Image (cartoon, rainbow, N blue to C red):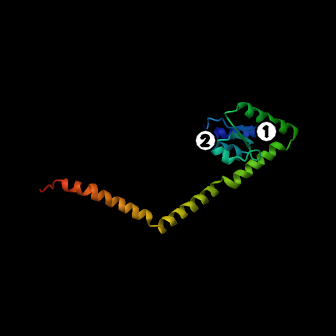
Amino acid sequence: MNRARNGELYRYIADVKGAFVQPAFYEAFGLTVVEAMTCGLPTFATCHGGPAEIIEDGISGFHIDPHHPDLVAALLINFFEKCRSDAGYWQMISDAGLRRIRERYTWKIYCERLLTLSGVYGFWKHVSKLERRETRRYLEMFYILKFRDLVKSIPLAID
């Protein structure tokens, strides 16, 4: 859970040409997957939730199904055997993971998308008066049905 320690752990694993395997229970959003891929680690993560969108299976990492541990073990064995027979395989997966992160998951890209979406939402809200009309009608309904009678029931205190 310690980010600084995790970063050092990722770097150590990368130095010894290891791989990062995301525990199935650890996280659903993929932040640890992004961190590991940013450090250049070939990454194995669950095929469910956020990690499935981040990793391109077999290109920038690998999808694993936590419900089938035998297949996960076979995938890991296959990866390390390919690394042993082809010296550039680990680096190829590592480079593809780094490229994937740079192309899709940087703060700059996130901020640009967020600003674009907020601009579209703001423009649409301004152009369509539906939300304002509906809100006004809703408030008027409450005023007529409830608030007006409540105001009449309040005794006036004259000092």
Out of 3 and 120, give the one closest to the viewer. Answer: 120
- Amino acid marked by disc 2: Ala
Q: Quadrant of residue 150?
A: bottom left
Q: Which mark is residue 28?
A: 2
Check disc 2: other Cα within 10 Å, few if <14, some if 14-19, many if 20+: some
What residue is pinned by disc 1? 17
| Viewport quadrant of the N terminus | top right
Out of 111 and 52, give the one closest to the viewer. Answer: 52
At a point 65% along the width and 53% down the height, the residue shown is: 106
At a point 64% along the width and 57% down the height, the residue shown is: 109
- Amino acid marked by disc 1: Lys
At a point 29% along the width and 58% down the height, the residue shown is: 143
Q: Where 66 sits versus 154, above or below?
A: above
Q: Which mark is residue 38?
A: none
Q: Percent position (x, y) of residue 72?
A: 73, 34
At a point 61% along the width and 44% down the height, the residue shown is: 29
- Asked whether, in this view, residue 44 is left or right of residue 139, the answer is right
| Viewport quadrant of the C terminus | bottom left
Q: Percent position (x, y) of residue 71?
A: 74, 33
Q: Nearer the viewer, mark 2 or mark 1?
A: 2
CB-based contact (under 8 Å), mark 2 and mark 1: no
CA separation, marks 2 and 1? 26 Å
- Asked whether, in this view, residue 61 is left or right of residue 81, the answer is left
Out of 59 and 65, give the one closest to the viewer. Answer: 65
